[in-house]
Image (cartoon, rainbow, N blue to C red):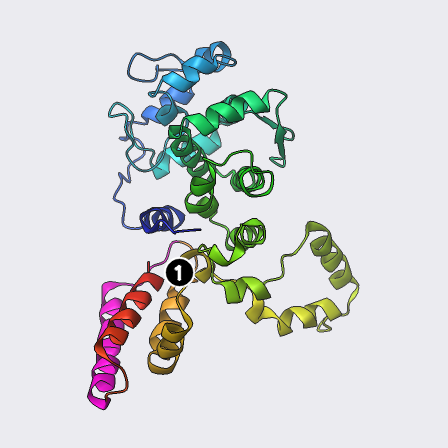
């Protein structure tokens, strides 16, 4: 059976929204860019570390060191949040831009990604697309991955860092790889929970994330216990293959301006079938509670779902939240006076609506 980790959901929503409210230095010249200096091969990672060129060369196949050393990962894949290594510095927005401007630095970043992939028994087949496959020693490396769960945290860090550095397409392939191995091939049972709670929701692109949520739901057993998206929307959702998208683009080019293709009409008719960000955030609730939420607090639920589907980087302000809270309180007060629902029912509705807003 599935159970959703809501602490993970909150953490990853904050990441996907680019750490809204995070205060950083705005003066790039005065900022000490430790992560950039490490990637420029100017300083060693701390504590007791190596220069990155030495690390990438000497640790290439040294799996024991990669497993046992817990200081390097925060330097190879820095994030805009603090980790367990107190000597590592959080990544900043200015640093991210500086990383992307340096071809040499980004080449090292891809090499670092390949280093960790090999450690996990994975090969980067295509540097342009991010396509992956199993390495020849995958069985041995998967055994290690199943045994040491701290690697799940490392993979989450790697996925987040890929997103920060502009490698979202790498993210998608890596998440799909782990969903396939955990849910379809069932080779990584001890990674499955992290793949669903964490890996899956590092994807910032809504369309890609919806595709992956649907893919996970299709292969989860038992499907009725899948809690990472609402079943009604997942049942209606139609994933789009790469071939169909290319065909659609070619077809649209042949149409005269203002004329819709047949597939475009179908798309218009089935827009409501797409699983929105609610597939990321909404828990499953029983039918009785759903009916009561719909009949009594339809507007509030609509507002909350709308918030969940906002463009990345936006969030409702405190005034909006307070306004919605007052509306919800007023509706519940009216309901209580009319005797339509008992107190426990009202509490259930409030709790479920609260979870929708996570």
Q: Residue 93 at x, y = what percent? A: 36, 39
For the point 30% across and 31% down, the residue is 29
Q: Residue furthest bottom?
A: 338
Residue 114 visible? The answer is: no
For the point 33% across and 75% down, the residue is 300
For the point 65% across and 29% down, the residue is 125
The residue nearer to you, when weighing 225 against 93, is 225
- Residue 80 vs 342, above or below: the answer is above
- Disc 1 residue crowd, few under 14, some 14–19, many 20+, Cα 10 Å: many
The residue nearer to you, when weighing 136 against 320, is 136
Horizontal side of residue 91 vs 87, given as left or right: right
Residue under numbered circle 1: 283
- Residue 20 vs 311, above or below: the answer is above
Q: Which residues are magenta?
A: 313-338
- Does residue 317 show up magenta in the picture? yes
Q: Helix, strand, or loop for circle 1? A: loop
Q: Residue furthest right?
A: 254
Q: Residue 87 at x, y = what percent? A: 26, 22
Q: Residue 294 at x, y = what percent? A: 39, 78
- Residue 355 vs 46, above or below: the answer is below
């Amino acid at each position: 059976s599935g159970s959703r980790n809501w602490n993970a959901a909150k953490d990853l929503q904050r990441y996907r929204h680019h750490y809204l409210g995070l205060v950083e230095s705005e003066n790039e010249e005065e900022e000490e860019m430790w992560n950039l200096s490490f990637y420029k091969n100017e300083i060693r990672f701390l504590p007791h570390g190596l220069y990155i060129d030495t690390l990438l060369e000497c640790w290439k196949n040294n799996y024991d060191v990669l497993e046992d050393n817990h200081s390097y990962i925060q330097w190879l894949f820095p994030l805009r949040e603090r980790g367990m290594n107190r000597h590592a510095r959080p990544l900043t927005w200015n640093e991210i831009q500086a990383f992307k401007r340096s071809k040499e630095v980004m080449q090292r970043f891809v090499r670092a990604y390949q280093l960790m992939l090999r450690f996990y028994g994975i090969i980067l087949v295509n540097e342009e697309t991010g396509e992956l496959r199993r390495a020849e020693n995958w069985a041995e490396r998967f055994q290690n991955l199943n045994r040491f769960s701290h690697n799940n945290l490392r993979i989450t860090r790697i996925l987040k860092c890929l997103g920060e550095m502009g490698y979202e397409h790498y993210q998608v392939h890596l998440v799909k790889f782990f969903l396939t191995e955990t849910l379809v091939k069932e080779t990584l049972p001890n990674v499955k929970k992290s793949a669903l709670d964490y890996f899956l929701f590092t994807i910032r692109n809504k369309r890609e994330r919806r595709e992956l949520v649907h893919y996970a739901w299709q292969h989860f057993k038992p499907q009725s216990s899948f809690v990472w998206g609402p079943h009604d929307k997942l049942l209606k959702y139609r994933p789009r293959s790469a071939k169909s998208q290319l065909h659609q683009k070619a077809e649209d080019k042949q149409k005269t301006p203002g004329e819709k293709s047949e597939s475009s009409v179908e798309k218009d008719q089935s827009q409501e079938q797409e699983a929105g960000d609610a597939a990321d955030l909404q828990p499953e609730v029983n039918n009785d509670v759903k009916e009561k939420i719909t009949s009594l607090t339809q507007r509030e639920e609509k507002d909350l779902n709308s918030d969940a589907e906002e463009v990345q980087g936006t969030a409702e302000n405190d005034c909006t939240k307070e306004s919605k809270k007052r509306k919800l309180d007023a509706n519940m007060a009216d309901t209580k006076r009319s005797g339509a629902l008992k107190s426990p029912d009202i509490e259930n509705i409030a709790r479920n609506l609260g979870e929708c807003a996570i």
